[in-house]
Amino acid sequence: MSNIPFQTIDWSAIEKTEHKGESGIAYWQTIQFPGLRIRLVEYSKGYLADHWCQKGHIVHCLEGEFVSELKSGEQLKLEKGGTYVVSDELSSHRSVTENGVKLLIVDGDFLKLNLL
């Protein structure tokens, strides 16, 4: 990772990209730095991810609520103000929301699995 100088992010100036789920749509606004990605993500009502993700994330719920389904069958609900953290390759998870949700998601090299 490289040094990132102090800066603000004007999310209204960041283009939204559309990502279809198994059902519903995810809208991403993405800022990319070397080894670090920051996204503002909105899932539409009835969103279900179309894949099991093994990437590590820091996910903070800004509005609404959603469920992180783990491939093991466990379901973890995250509501406004809640956060989860996981490193790469430590879980297979996907998101589902009934009524829609807005998230801040941070991921990058610092979440790579560290085998000592």
Image (tube, rainbow, N blue to C red):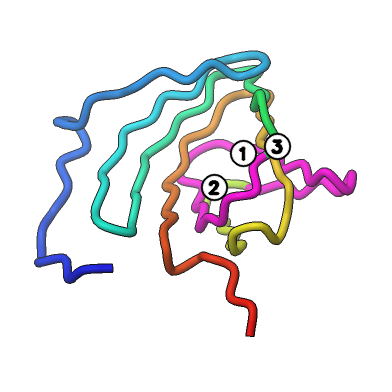
Vertical order, 35 against 72 (above or below): below
In the picture of the structure, the residue carrying the numbered disc 1 is 65
- Residue found farthest to the right: 73
Residue carrying label 2: 80
**Numbered disc 3: secondary structure:** loop
Give, as a single range, the part of the protein colored magenta: 53-78
Q: Which mark is residue 3?
A: none
Task: Count neighbours of disc 1 (C-alpha within 10 A) and say few if under 14, some if 14 to 19, many if 20 or more.
Answer: many
Q: Nearer the viewer, mark 3 or mark 1?
A: 3
Image quadrant occupied by the C terminus: bottom right
Horizontally, residue 45 falls left or right of residue 92, namely: left
Q: Amino acid at mark 1?
A: Glu
Residue 10 screen position, x and y as percent: 15, 41
Q: Earlier in the sequence, mark 3 or mark 1?
A: 3
Whether pointer 2 and pointer 1 mark residues with C-beta atoms closer than 8 Å, the reply is yes
The residue carrying pointer 2 sits among few (fewer than 14), some (14 to 19) or many (20 or more) residues within 10 Å by Cα, namely some
User: Which residue appears at 58% of the width and 75% of the height?
Assistant: 114
Tell me the residue at 58%/50% (across/down). Answer: 55
Per the model, the C-alpha gap separating discs 3 and 1 is 19 Å
